[in-house]
Image (cartoon, rainbow, N blue to C red):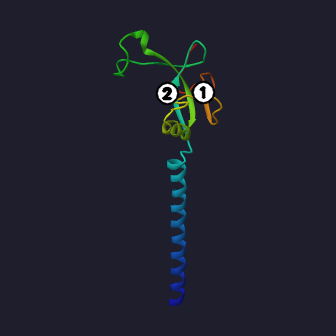
Amino acid sequence: MDVMDKKTKAANRIFYILVILLILASAGVAFVKIFIQKDYQILAKTSCDPQTEKCFVRVCDPESDTTCPTVEADRTSYYKKISKKAATIALCDATAEKVGCGAELTCTQGEVSCSYTFCDKTTVGVDEVCKE
């Protein structure tokens, strides 16, 4: 009976060691993908020209937003959504020339995994409004 208990304890130890190793390996892979390779998409809002594009509309409320302009005409802003790979943002920031970098996120010509979302019936979310 004592020999069987030792074999069971040894098997349990091996099992737990394997589980811990698998957890550490998956955490390592996630760390490399997120922090080293920056292999994920950034979703943000960027400026939009309502004269040429189908924009989302934001009207700020000075009662709830302290950064809201005092002039009523300046309270309306237009935006579109951008989806961009985080690695391209990091590459842009790392270069001295800042090629393709701007004051805000943009898709550069030929950039893979970068896209804009304009406002329409299928893309408008809760509490969002399209410019008519």
**Label 1: element kind:** strand
**Label 2: element kind:** loop
Q: Position of residue 46 (x, y in %)?
A: 52, 25
Is residue 94 shown above or below 59? below
CA neighbours of label 1 inside 10 A, class few (<14), some (14 to 19), many (20+): some
Q: Which mark is residue 117?
A: 1
* For marks 2 and 1 on the same chain, the one whose residue lies earlier in the sequence: 2
Q: Is residue 14 visible?
A: yes
Looking at the picture, which amino acid does disc 1 mark? Thr
Is residue 32 shown above or below 107? below
Would you identify the image quadrant in which residue 113 lies?
top right
Nearer to us of marks 2 and 1 is 2
Looking at the picture, which amino acid does disc 2 mark? Glu
Q: Position of residue 48 (x, y in %)?
A: 54, 19
- The residue depicted at 53 percent of the width and 34 percent of the height is 43
Q: Which mark is residue 104?
A: 2
Quadrant for the C terminus in the image: top right
